[in-house]
Image: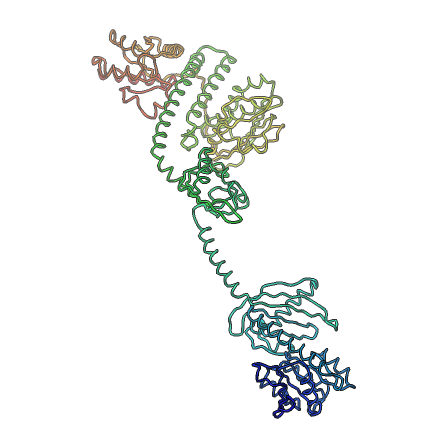
Amino acid sequence: MTDGHSTSGNTTVLNDMSNYETYNKILLIEDNPGDARLVELLLGESDLLNCQVVNKTTLALGLEELEANDDYEAILLDLTLPDSRGFETLEILLDKFPENNVIVLTGLSDKSLGVNAVKAGAQDFLIKGAFDADGLAKSLRYSIERNNVLKRLEETQRIAGIGNWEFNSDTDEYKGSDEVFVIFGLKPKKGALKGKETFAANSPLDIFNQIHQETIADPQKTIKKDIKIQRTDGTIRYAFVQCTANKSAENNLVLSGIIQDITERKLTEQEMVKSQERYQEIFSKSNDAIYICDKKGVLVDFNEATTRLFGFNAFEMKGKNIHNLLSPVASRFELIERLESKGTVKDFEIEIEQKSGDRKYCIITANNLEKEDFQGYNGIIRDITERKQAEELIKARDLARQSAKMKEQFIASISHEMRTPMNAVLGMSNLVIKTKLDDEQFNYISSIKQSSEILLGIINDILEISTLQNGKVDFEYKDFDLHELLANLINVMQYKFKEKDMVFEVEIGEKVGRYIKGDKLRLNQVLYNLVGNGVKFTDTGHVKLKVQNLNENEGIVQLNFEVEDTGIGIPADKLGAVFETFTRVRNKNRIYEGTGLGLSISKNLIEQQGGKIGVRSVLGEGSTFFFDLVFEKGSEVLGIREEDSIDDVEFEGDIDLLLVEDHKMNQLVARKTLEKQWPDIRITIADNGQIAVNLLKERKFDIILMDIQMPIMDGYEATDYIRNHMPAICNMPILAMTAHAHISKDEKFKEYGMDDFVLKPFEPKQLFNKIAKYVQRNNINE
């Protein structure tokens, strides 16, 4: 110990440190012993305690010491050394140990060198001979404190996984704290780094260059982004980077910022995403509708099954109130009340309304869902429509059977009620047409008869519309005269046109053959429907029927029919519906009568024969209905007036006939028709079955014409009584003469013992033949 100082080689311990556990190490690189001693003396005089000064006389020795012991709080560096002189001395030291605090010692004449040294990275500079103990202590104290702050900062960065960095794009220099290299899985490097040779792919320089491009685009913007890093060993890390752009003293663009390792957070987020994806998979792939709504029922989330169930797309479904889609209203309110009072419901039966308006039977299980920022319900809806339908299958079947039976009874009743007066009309026409008539009278009666036949065909189609729609119509293909058919159509429709003072034109193309083979009645019915439709909806102008030959080959001809009118026309949006069943044109100024079946029936009749039908129309100007049909080429048909026809039935008619019929007009028609054919026939009329039975008890008849639907005792009951309770006449021929159209299909008449039937309106010749047949057979058997 000498003057409070101890020396040991080139190491000087200032003040006795025996009472101190730690001390500040200072490296002095100085070759002048006087200057070195002066530094030691000044430190001894200062209030800076606990210092250990290690003196090295050359730069090389100083660098070796720092390699061995890099724990110095500060370095006092003389710029003029035996092995290095000037500014280069500082550059060599900072290049190898950039993190150390360097205080440059320079001569009075080299003051500017000290200033440049600070710019180059030195912490401070002292001019030899110009600093005292306080000045030296102040500079060292600042250096020591700065070093401590940096150490604490580095420790903080290490704990937080944060590194700071700086990148000069103009000089291509990079500086970064140790933690930057740790994040990238690299060994920390001191000093400014140039180029990319020291970095692997996806290195800091790569990333900072990318950020540089973004910064150039918007220098005022602070870049914040998450990046993915693949280390050289293949491991993946994630980091958050924040970067700002600034200008250096040399006006260079300098990027600086921080980088933080967020791998753990990112992995946690990814795991949460995977968990959410697993939940989402269950959520999205569930066949049941899963949803979340607020307390008012407004949907905030739902799966794809929800959109399928309700029939809305996701955009339409978002924000919709699910309560409004539940019905009936009473059940909806009960569901909401249970949720509010109990917080849960399970398998609650309810109906839901789809976008299309259809309803589905469902069950709902729902629970309260309460969070800090949300209150509502989550629910699951299961479609049980099929199960519900299965439960109601027996009821539906029984109801269907009952409905079918009621329909059958209704059709039978309607058939009877409509055919009965038609029998009178046709019967009277047949009677009149056999009288002496002039041509005008014959045409009138022919038109009445033709109209009656057409009306009868329409009645049949109306009563059997279901048969039409099922494609079970029977078509008859016979030769007929197309010109005669059109002429009859003109005769039938002419009076309607005269009533409206309109023109009805028929144009037949030159290539249209006169005789064709097909279903005359069905073609007539379609044309009657279309022409009648035209005149109904036309008040002024004309209706024109055109027939053209579209195509023909050996034995086959394709004809096109067009019915053009100048009527009210059809709105464009209604064109597709005019052929639908029970569709009628609506007009606010007028009500048009009709069933709405004519066009539907025509469409069915045409399409079931392989044809096509369509319509063109301009609202307010008129419509054109057109259809194509294929016919066989026919042979000439010889027209014979019924008054000149000869009945080929070999039967004199000298018989007693009992007519059981309650309808007075039909009694007259039948009696006059039979008497016209057989003047010697004796006809007795009974108004019902009971009267007929009473007459049969008193006298004998050769044959009975038995109506079915009559008061007191109907035809079935009367026939059954005769067969089972009157043995003397039980084999008498009984023919059902009825307006019930179904009798020919179910042959129910045979169950009651009737021999045959004649359907009203009857064809006279058919009636004559059957009477003759059964009377002759009965005579032979007797």
**Residue at the location (66% across, 72% down)?**
167
Specify the quadrant of the image occupied by residue 362: top left
Side (left or right) of 624 relative to 454: right
Q: Where is 98 relative to 582, above or below?
A: below
Can residue 359 be seen here? The reply is: yes
Q: Where is 41 relative to 276, above or below?
A: below
The residue closer to the viewer here, 458 or 57, is 57
Q: Position of residue 761 (x, y in %)?
A: 40, 18
**Residue at the location (54% across, 25% down)?**
533
Question: Which corner quadrant holds the C terminus?
Answer: top left
Q: Position of residue 506 (x, y in %)?
A: 57, 25
For this orientation, the residue located farthest to the top is 698
**Residue at the location (20% across, 14% down)?**
727
Specify the quadrant of the image occupied by residue 221: bottom right
Q: Position of residue 288 (x, y in %)?
A: 43, 46
Q: Position of residue 109 (x, y in %)?
A: 79, 86
Q: Where is 680 relative to 530, above or below?
A: above
The residue closer to the viewer here, 101 or 83, is 101
Side (left or right) of 535 relative to 634: right
Total residue callouts:
0
